Amino acid sequence: MAGRILIVDDVATNRIVLKVKLSAARYETMQAGSGAEALRLVGQYAPDLILLDVHLPDMTGLEVLARLKADPATAEIPVLMITAFPDPRTRLAALQAGAADHLVKPFDEQILLARLRGLLRTREADQELKLRERTFRDLGFAEGPALFETRSLIALIGSTREEAQSWKRFLARHLGRAVVEVVAREDALGDVALAQGYDAYVISADLGRPGDGLRLMSELRSRSRSREAVICIALPEGARDSAAMALDLGASDLVPEVMGAPFAAQEAALRIDRALARKRRHERLRDHLTDGLRLAMTDPLTGLHNRRYAMSQLARMADRAQATGRPFAVMALDLDRFKAVNDTWGHAAGDAVLVEVAQRLRAQLRQVDLLARIGGEEFLVALPDTAPEAAQAAAERLCHAISEAPIALPEPEAQGRAVRITASIGLAPCDPLSDSAPVEALISRADRALLGSKAGGRNQVSVFRRDAAA
């Protein structure tokens, strides 16, 4: 499943309709008909996202939202408020209370699913960063001092300069200390504009031609100096296709195009501020992790995580799997006949091989996967939220990536030669619903499967089978 979603609505028909739509998109759903039931299910199952009706029989949706946000265990779960009454005042109140968005029934399925995809992507990135930060703290490395927060610099790019100037007038009342500048669309990708290092962009979806704003957003996402910026797309009411496409292309959020409407400028400023706060939080976490982990928990040769970090991270991954009931997998990977490389060409050649293998492995794995060098030519890989079949396919892919092309050896000893390297892999899948083995046992299983790969002729993947080992 793509994620676990709790549907909270007092009308059973509404819950069933949403369940059908979400199940068709491969989401796992749960249902609640009241606020109390919703809070109980959240505490018991920790869903990835909540669809919460404003009107419930025992309490309002805003009261449920307030209780969720007040509890550290549930505060980070994204909540989409839903209602049958399109009231701008209620919409703004929901956003101010911490709702990720406020949607009106009947839903546009395309926009709903695009919004869900975007929120779940963001949640996954948040969870991964926080998981790594907790691992870092557990290993005894304190968080660095808070940095002085500079003013945010925001670029406004409208379909006309007059439109961007009107945005600036309305937003200036609500954006506090931020510096807001109007930027011409033809200048946005120029060296001068990119050198400004804008923290956020607000871009009209249609810059002269339909979709030009979305194309500009894609270009900004491809530039290193603007890739991590907040990008909000300004849309007219009812632009469903552009809204869904903007979210899927990576828009941080959507804001009203007509900011002179009641509460529109407040809503836009709130969405921009919230996206900027998330960006700053991610930057602090990334900088803290980058500086500390690089020094304390990485292998200096390959740049991969070392054993110390890997064991702590793997333990957290296993705990998370137990809490969510989702499968994961552990791999033990060993280079075949690696000693011969060192004996024949020297340790510099062996180091070059290890560096290249690390790069090939990293290129085949997701950002959320764990990759570590835990010994001379030994590597550990862990795949969260991965079923056994997908884990085996990933292991086969790693095996092929290592052996598919020879590795060039350094001069002068190797005299321009290259060597073909293969790897043996032992895979140990784990389904926490039926298997509560500790991390050490999982690594032992992967090692036993690795021995099977070696005995079977090397350059292959062997999977640990619990029934065969019994």
Image (spheres, helix red, strand yellow):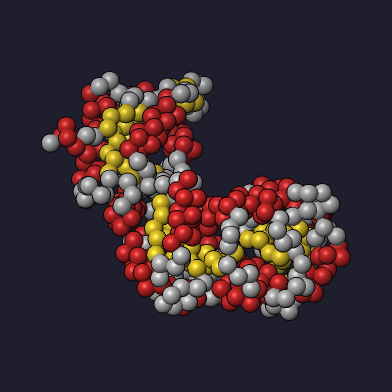
Residue 288 x, y percent position in the rendering: 48, 62
The reply to whether residue 150 is in sight is no
The reply to whether residue 15 is in sight is yes
Name the residue located 80 percent from the left edge and 74 percent from the top edge: 169
Quadrant in which residue 425 is drawn: top left
> Observer-nearest residue: 463 or 406?
463
Please state if 436 lies on the left or on the right of 66 as rendered. left
Residue 334 x, y percent position in the rendering: 32, 33
> Observer-nearest residue: 343 or 117?
117
Name the residue located 53 percent from the left edge and 75 percent from the top edge: 97
Q: Is residue 414 above or below residue 258?
A: above
Please state if 73 lies on the left or on the right of 196 as rendered. left
Please state if 441 lies on the left or on the right of 352 as rendered. left
Residue 396 x, y percent position in the rendering: 38, 29
Q: Is residue 372 above or below residue 71?
A: above
Name the residue located 84 percent from the left edge and 52 percent from the top edge: 208
Residue 350 x, y percent position in the rendering: 40, 31
Q: Is residue 293 above or below residue 259?
A: above
Name the residue located 33 percent from the left edge and 35 percent from the top edge: 333
Q: Is residue 311 above or below residue 36?
A: above
Task: Count numbered badges in the picture.
Answer: 0
Extreme residue in the left direction = 470
